[in-house]
Amino acid sequence: MTITKDTIIGDILTIAPQTAPIFLSIGMHCLGCPASRGETVEQACAVHGVDVDALLAKVNEAIAAGN
């Protein structure tokens, strides 16, 4: 699965829980709250002032590597 800016964070964490540290490392510390799990990657990046393309690259790389 390729993660895009429209992918829901909760869906990412369900299929690739190993990506949680990536989100935590950029300040997304509320991964457990229902609101944040329902946000898209783009929405979360906008709230946290993070470049969506850079985050997508890291998440997709981690998923492809299996870690």
Image (cartoon, helix red, strand yellow):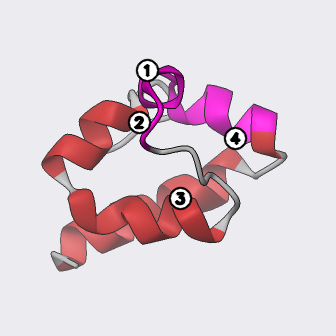
Among numbered discs 1 and 2, the one appearing first in the sequence: 2
Location of residue 13 with respect to 61 vertically, above or below: above
Vertically, is 35 above or below 14? above
**Label 2 near label 1: C-beta < 8 Å?**
yes
Q: Secondary structure at mark 3?
A: helix
Mark 3 or mark 4: name the one nearer the start of the chain. Answer: 3
Q: Which residues are magenta?
A: 32-47
Cα separation, mark 4 vs mark 1, equals: 13 Å
Quarter residue 60 falls in: bottom left
SS of the residue under disc 4: helix
Give the residue type that dot 4 points to.
Answer: Cys
Q: Residue at x 43, y 37 (%)?
A: 4
- Tag 3 residue: 23
Q: Quadrant of the N terminus?
A: top left
Residue 1 visible in the shown view = no
Counting residues from the N terminus, which is met first, the one under dot 3 or under dot 1?
Answer: 3
Q: Position of residue 54 (x, y in %)?
A: 64, 61
Residue 57: numbered disc: none
- Report if residue 7 is visible in the image: yes
Residue under pointer 2: 9
Residue designated by label 4: 45
Displayed quadrant of residue 48: top right
Q: Disc 1 marks which residue?
A: 38
Q: CA distance from mark 4 to mark 2?
A: 11 Å
Foreground: disc 3 or disc 4: 3
- Element type at marker 2? helix
